[in-house]
Amino acid sequence: MTRLGDLLEDGTRRSAVLRWSALGLAALIAAWLAAEVWRDAGAFAFLLLGLPVVACLVAVLTSRSRYARPVTWGAAAVVLGWSLVLGLGIGLFFLPVAFVLAAAAARDDPARDDPARQDRAGRRPLRR
């Protein structure tokens, strides 16, 4: 039988995997578009392609803090906004990254670190 603590740990692991997936996807898209954007925009390509990657990196680096969920929501909003601003060009390629970050933020459990919601063993008790 699966313990509730195992399920919570599994949910935290899933949100971490989604954050890392968003970072990898953003880096892959940025690398794929780099040559074309460099020819078109020059050094501005670092900003065009780097902002979504940096937003995902911030979400990954804060994944163990208690601010992981709001930072991930913020990163998803930044990437979504950036993809809409650049929507007629390369921005649409970053839409999947925004959706993966939003899924990671929605999947994150903010109560996992709240001692008031845990029993002595560090697990949340079942609600009746």
Image: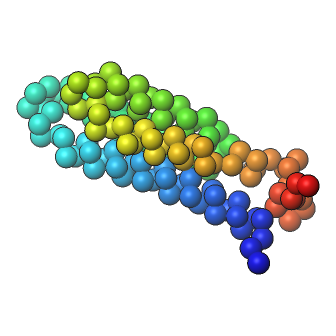
Residue 118 percent coordinates (x, y): 85, 55
Q: In which image quadrant can residue 106 be found? A: top right
Instruction: State the image coordinates of residue 82 (x, y, percent, origin top left).
Output: 36, 26
Dividing the picture into quadrants, the one containing residue 46 is: top left
Q: In this view, does 127 lie above or below 1?
A: above
Query: In the image, what residue occupies the spot 86% across and 59% down?
Result: 126
- Most distant residue in the bottom direction: 1
Q: Foreground residue, 42 or 69?
A: 69
Residue at (70, 64) in percent of width and height = 7
Q: Can residue 106 be seen in this view?
A: yes
Counting from the top left corner in percent of width and height, residue 39 is at 8, 32
What colour scheme was applied to this rendering of the protein?
Answer: rainbow
Q: Is residue 59 visible?
A: no
Is residue 76 left or right of 35 when viewed as pictured? right
Q: Which of 99 and 35 is in front in this view?
A: 99
Name the quadrant of the C terminus.
bottom right
Q: Which residue lies at the image location 48% right of the left edge and 34% below the top edge?
A: 75
Q: Which residue is drawn at 28% across and 31% down?
A: 91
Query: From the viewer's perspective, is residue 39 above or below residue 11?
Result: above
